[in-house]
Structure formats: structure tokens, C-alpha cells
């Protein structure tokens, strides 16, 4: 990847990371009452960001595969990107459930 592609990728991913704030979530109205609520809110936000980036990487993997032209190295790269994107989507969508499960183990409400 050249410098121009890296910069455009960072800008694209960065814009999707801010999508949570676009839905009217303001910091001053976000006042959790305890640590558990704060941690669940953070996990929900981070999970949304991870799922967004993983969805973009799913599309990138498809583009890599379609433009591989039979190159085995590029096909392997597309497969690796796809596997990591699927793992990212699973982790991103399960972030809140993971926090709830750990809170249950610890004994937090």
C-alpha cells in the first residue's frame, strides 16, 4: 500500500468510528450512575465501532478476492481478511453480552 491509500483508509475508518456520536449521544447527557453502567456503555460504543470496521473489512476482503485475477497470494490475503472480519463482527456484536456475563460472574447488578 502506498501512502495515499493508507491515509484514505485511515480517514474512512475514522469517520465510521464517530458514527456513535452522530445519533445524538452527547457526553454531558451521558451520566452513568455507577461503574457497571459506565462499563456497559463503553463496551456498547466500542462494540459498535469494532462491528463497523469489521463490516468495512468484509467489503475490502471481497474487493481483494474479486481483483485477485487468480493470484494465490492475493486470494490467501483475502481469506485472512475475511476470517478476521468475521471474528471482529462476532466480537463487536457480542461485546455487550460479554460484559453482562462478566458482571454476572463478579456479582455486579
Image (cartoon, grey):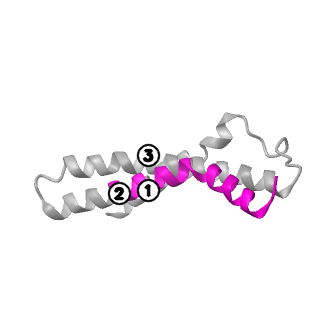
Please state which of residues 92 and 23 is positioned toward the viewer in this rendering: 92
The image quarter in which residue 104 lies: bottom right
Q: Secondary structure at mark 2?
A: helix
Which residue bears the numbered disc 2? Answer: 83
Q: From the top left corner, tell me how far across and down residue 35 is, in percent.
A: 83, 58
Please check the rendered image and state whether residue 64 is part of the magenta-colored stretch, yes or no. no
Magenta portion: prevailing SS class: helix
Residue 11 seen anywhere in this rendered image of the structure: no
Q: Residue at x 48, y 51 (%)?
A: 90
Which residue bears the numbered disc 1? Answer: 87
Instruction: State the extent of the magenta-drawn residues as a range.
Output: 82-109
Q: Is residue 77 left or right of residue 106?
A: left
The image quarter in which residue 30 lies: top right
State the separation of the CA atoms marked 3 and 1.
11 Å
Q: From the top left corner, tell me how far across and down residue 46 is, in percent.
A: 62, 53
Neighbours of disc 3 within 10 Å: few (<14), some (14-19), many (20+): some
Which residue bears the numbered disc 3? Answer: 55
Amino acid at each position: 500500500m502506498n501512502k495515499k491509500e493508507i491515509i484514505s483508509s485511515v480517514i474512512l475508518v475514522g469517520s465510521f468510528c464517530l458514527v456513535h456520536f452522530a445519533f445524538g449521544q452527547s457526553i454531558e447527557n451521558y451520566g452513568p450512575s455507577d461503574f457497571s453502567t459506565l462499563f456497559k456503555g463503553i463496551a456498547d460504543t466500542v462494540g459498535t465501532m469494532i462491528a463497523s470496521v469489521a463490516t468495512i473489512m468484509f467489503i475490502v476482503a471481497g474487493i481483494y478476492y474479486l481483483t485477485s485475477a487468480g493470484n494465490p497470494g492475493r486470494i490467501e490475503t483475502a481469506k485472512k481478511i475475511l476470517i478476521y472480519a468475521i471474528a471482529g463482527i462476532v466480537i463487536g456484536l457480542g461485546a455487550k453480552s460479554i460484559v453482562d456475563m462478566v458482571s454476572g460472574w463478579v456479582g455486579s447488578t
